[in-house]
Image (spheres, rainbow, N blue to C red):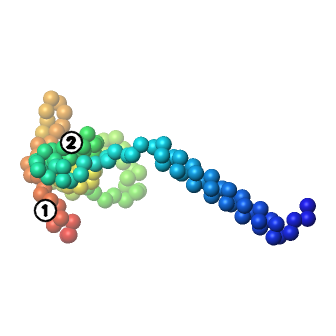
Amino acid sequence: MSDTPQTLGDDAQAMADEWASAMAEQTATDAAAQPAAAPVFQPLAATAGNPSSATHNDIDLILDIPVQMTVELGRTKIAIKNLLQLAQGSVVELDGMAGEPMDVLVNGCLIAQGEVVVVNDKFGIRLTDIITPSERIRKLNR
């Protein structure tokens, strides 16, 4: 095998040209074989005549998405050595006061406040105040 560098270069170029030709042919075949993709979303102009139905349809898309709802009684900071000393029956003092509204969080974002109630031997919360978007923004800026 006494190929000169020029011969190896010609072989590599010929192989690269052959690959490029095959890839171009494959791309053309794939494009012809695939039907045109249908649009996933409706154009905005299609719903412009009836904005309330567009809004109703849009909200329907997210109604089944699960979210994490938390009711927070209060918070506290505790040293690790005190945390390790906790046992059954231990009492941890929280910063929330008795009778004070509890915070209702959805995915960690405060959305309402309420009071604890008992219904059929289970705890619940009666919403007393819904936080408006402007109030949420004001609380974030603090």
User: What residue is drawn where x is 28% and y is 43%?
Assistant: 65
Relative side of 87 to 103, left or right: right
Q: Is residue 124 above or below residue 12?
A: above
Q: Nearer the viewer, residue 42 or 88?
A: 42
Residue 108 x %, y %: 27, 54
Q: Mark 2 belongs to which amino acid?
A: Asp
Whole-Å distance between the Cαs marked 1 and 2? 26 Å
Residue denoted by label 2: 60
- The answer to whether one can see residue 94 in this image is no
Tag 1's secondary structure? helix
- Do the CB atoms of the residues marked 1 and 2 lie less than 8 Å apart? no
- In this rendering, would 88 be left or right of 20? left
Q: Position of residue 75 (x, y in %)?
A: 25, 55
For the point 36% across and 48% down, which residue is it?
86
- Give the amino acid type for the residue marked by disc 1 in the picture: Glu
User: Dot 1: few (<14), some (14–19), or many (≥20) neighbours within 10 Å?
Assistant: few
Disc marking residue 135 = 1
Q: Neighbour class for label 2 at 10 Å: few (<14), some, many (≥20)? A: few
